[in-house]
Image: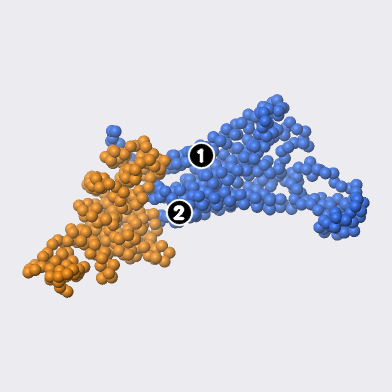
Amino acid sequence: MTTVVESVDTTALAVRTQGLGKRYRTKWALRDCAFELPAGRVAALVGANGAGKTTLMSVLAGLLKPDEGTAVTSGRVAFVSQDKPVYRHFSAADMLRMGARLNTVWDQTRAERWLERFEIPLGKACGKLSGGQQAQVAFALAIGSRPTVLMLDEPLANLDPLARREVTAELLTEVEETGMTVLLSTHVVAELGGVADYLLLLAHGRLLAGGDLDELLARHVLYTGPKSDVPPALGTVVEARHRGNQSTFLLELPEDQPRPVVAGQWTERPVTLEDYVLAQLAATRKGIGA
Amino acid sequence: MTVTAVPVQRRDKVGWGDLVWLTWRQHRWSIGGLAVLLGVGAVVCLVVAAVVRNTGRVDMLGVIGVYGLSQLAAMAPMGIGAVIGVFWAAPLVSREYEQKTSVVVWSQDLSPARWTLGKIVLLGVPAVGLAAGFGSSALVLARAVNSTFPPEWQPYQPFQQFVFEASPLVQIGYAAFGFGLGLALSALTRRTIVAMALTLGGFIVARMVVAIGWRPYYQTPVREVWPYGEDSERPYGQLAQDHGLHVDGGYLDAAGREVDFPMVCARTSTDGNSFQKCMADHGVVSHFTDYQPVERAGTFQVIEFFVFAVPAVALLVFAYHWVKRSHRI
């Protein structure tokens, strides 16, 4: 099988993969992964630990060679790995100097602005900065290289709650100003509230679901009512839970049909991202729909 | 802190100047440290050599003395290749992996292949340059010391290990080999300490095996034979005065075959005559000495260079492809 990594010529797509697979010895970390990510989106790559998120990003960043399938990214790609590595003996200013030296496109103003925004001392060796500060240096380096696709692996992992909010806000500002596409991975779904508008859900190295977040959530509904073996409306059961006298169903509604109305003892509520992701992940664990 | 608006910089490619900047910024202490050490050493050698040549005196420099200094200087080149391999090359790739900075540097507009080539050239060339430069200075001092002795008593001779190995050409071979070995092990193990230890061990073993087991046989040794007998002993030290490389020596029988020394003669003989009779009884007819004539020293240095330079190139090519292959498309 041939493996091709090339640039997407259409501006509409930022990333496209087809039948992408990567294995470590005999174990497939990523298998048969196909999706299209439209340009200008902030996509969340969600999955349990070991689902293949880092592998997928490394392949897209060109750091790993896929064993099968194709991965295509448009334009320049910047990747910040989970450890947010920086050269310990370099100062933040040196890291930016390195960015200017090792990139064909470099936006010093944007990179410096990021560091200034998070009050990172420019002259101090990175090894003496806190983990959170090092992460900001790594982000500034990625932002400065003016990527068309910015990939962040667990970007908020070692930031404090306030910094998390600020980083996501700054990221959205950068997206707005530069039109870049962001792909960020996480296993903490709650972090994504109001940030991501596109979802890629990975489980066991395969893509479970993907698409526009609003559309995805609008197609699903959560019903709670008296104990029952069947849901009160037509649709695919993503998750069914029974506790005491109560049953809860997360349904995927049939496409192109009006939203069903349920009455009686059943209550309906919209599905949140967290509901959806957890239900999907739980379903794969139980083997439903696999 | 003020941020002034700098226009977005756009270029065609990452150039060698950028690689020079990166290499110097990352390795300035190890490059600078070794360069200063060897540079100062070389200058001291050259200055002392000039003084010795102009004054003809070697009774300077107190306890160490000019001779002691020249010995130190001649010994130093033995270790340069190892230092370069262990401290320059062995951490080169592994430290990037360990600190995960490989992900950073290789996800800029710089491929791992180009990065590796850059490091090989920008660290390898100074490495062989420093080794060759210091080796030459040590030799200049050795020759200056030699010039104060009559020819037959000169202390530094071409086949003497220190002198042989300090030759710039040989030094280039050692430094390149050390660098190649360190880099290959660094890429292969991805562990700095392991790579450093294996490089040190591998370098010492390779150098010893070549120096002891191979170098004496680069060319077929010249065999000198003379009859065994009371008054026909070859004068002691004659070979040493020829300054050749001793390879082997022993006894021959009438047919010219090598004979083991008959230990029984040493045990049973009571005087010289009975000893010689015993030897003759055991078939000893003549002595022989195998040696490499001093004129061959230059050729041997060229051979020694290739013995190390060829594997060095192979190791560097391997390291280059290993780094390139394990990453990037």
> Which residue is pictured at 35% across the width and 41% down the height?
A129
- Secondary element type, mark 2: helix
Residue that numbered label 2 is attached to: B324
Q: Are marks 1 and 2 in contact (CB under 8 Å)?
A: no
Name the side, left or right, on which B317 lies relative to A204.
Answer: right
Residue that numbered label 1 is attached to: B31
- A100 shown above or below B54: below
Q: Which mark is residue B264?
A: none
The front one of B77 and A180 is B77
Name the side, left or right, on which B245 lies relative to A52.
Answer: right
Q: Position of residue A77 (x, y in %)?
A: 33, 51
Name the side, left or right, on which A246 lies relative to A151.
Answer: left
Q: Position of residue B126 (x, y in %)?
A: 53, 40
In the picture, which quadrant includes the C terminus of chain B? bottom left
Amino acid type assigned to the residue bearing label 1 in the image: Ile
Pointer 1 chain: B
Q: Which chain is blue?
A: B
Quarter of the view holding residue B54: top right
Pointer 2 chain: B
Quarter of the view holding residue B282: bottom right
Q: How is the image coloured?
A: by chain
The front one of B64 and B24 is B64
Colour chosen for chain A: orange
Q: Position of residue A192 (x, y in %)?
A: 23, 53
Q: Are marks 1 and 2 on the same chain?
A: yes
* Residue A119 showing in the rendered view: yes
Q: Position of residue B203 (x, y in %)?
A: 59, 50
Amino acid type assigned to the residue bearing label 2 in the image: Lys
